[in-house]
Amino acid sequence: MRRCECGAKDCDAVVYMTWEEQDRADHVGQRWAIARGHTPRGGVRWRVIEETDRFVIVEIDEEEAPLI
């Protein structure tokens, strides 16, 4: 279980993932796990990597990602 990473200030969604699913999201590039129906915030380009009935893993285009 983890919090949605969509970036919306008011988002309190919880994403239920197995350890294996979390590894696929966490250990490759700029991937975020978000709740179904949510969209990544921040004005960046992104694409869906994996979609299930519980969550969506998106990958952020690193060349377009804002600097923090």
Image (cartoon, rainbow, N blue to C red):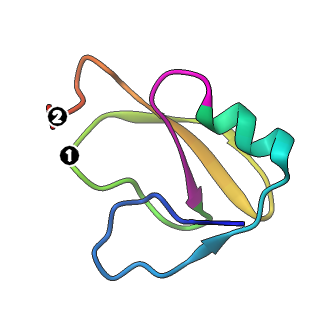
Q: Amino acid at mark 1?
A: Gly
* Residue nearest the observer in this picture, 43 or 32: 32
The answer to whether residue 28 is magenta is yes
Give left or right: position of 4 versus 49: left
Question: Few, some or many C-alpha atoms within 10 Å of disc 1 (few <14, some 14-19, many ≥20)?
Answer: few
> How many numbered badges does the structure rendering display?
2
* Residue nearest the observer in this picture, 12 or 35: 12
* Residue nearest the observer in this picture, 14 or 39: 14
Residue 23 falls in image quadrant: top right
Give the image location of residue 48, x and y in percent: 57, 38
Q: Secondary structure at mark 2?
A: loop
Tell me, for residue 43, which label it has, or none.
Answer: 1
The stretch of residues the image draws in magenta is 27-34
Q: Are marks 1 and 2 in contact (CB under 8 Å)?
A: yes
Task: Identify the residue at the far top of this view.
Answer: 63
Tell me, for residue 7, which label it has, or none.
Answer: none
- Residue 15 against residue 11 in the figure, above or below: above
First in sequence, mark 1 or 2: give its number: 1
Give the image location of residue 20, x and y in percent: 85, 39
Quarter of the image with the N terminus is bottom right
Question: Which marked residue is nearer to the observer: mark 1 or mark 2?
Answer: 2
The answer to whether residue 43 is magenta is no
Residue occupying image coordinates x 64% and y 37%:
25
Give left or right: position of 65 versus 1: left
Residue occupying image coordinates x 38% and y 53%:
40
Task: Name the residue carrying label 2.
Answer: 66
Residue occupying image coordinates x 20% and y 46%:
43
Task: Identify the residue at the far left of this view.
Answer: 67
- Residue 62 against residue 7 in the figure, above or below: above
* Residue nearest the observer in this picture, 43 or 9: 9
Q: Amino acid at mark 2?
A: Pro
Q: Secondary structure at mark 1?
A: loop
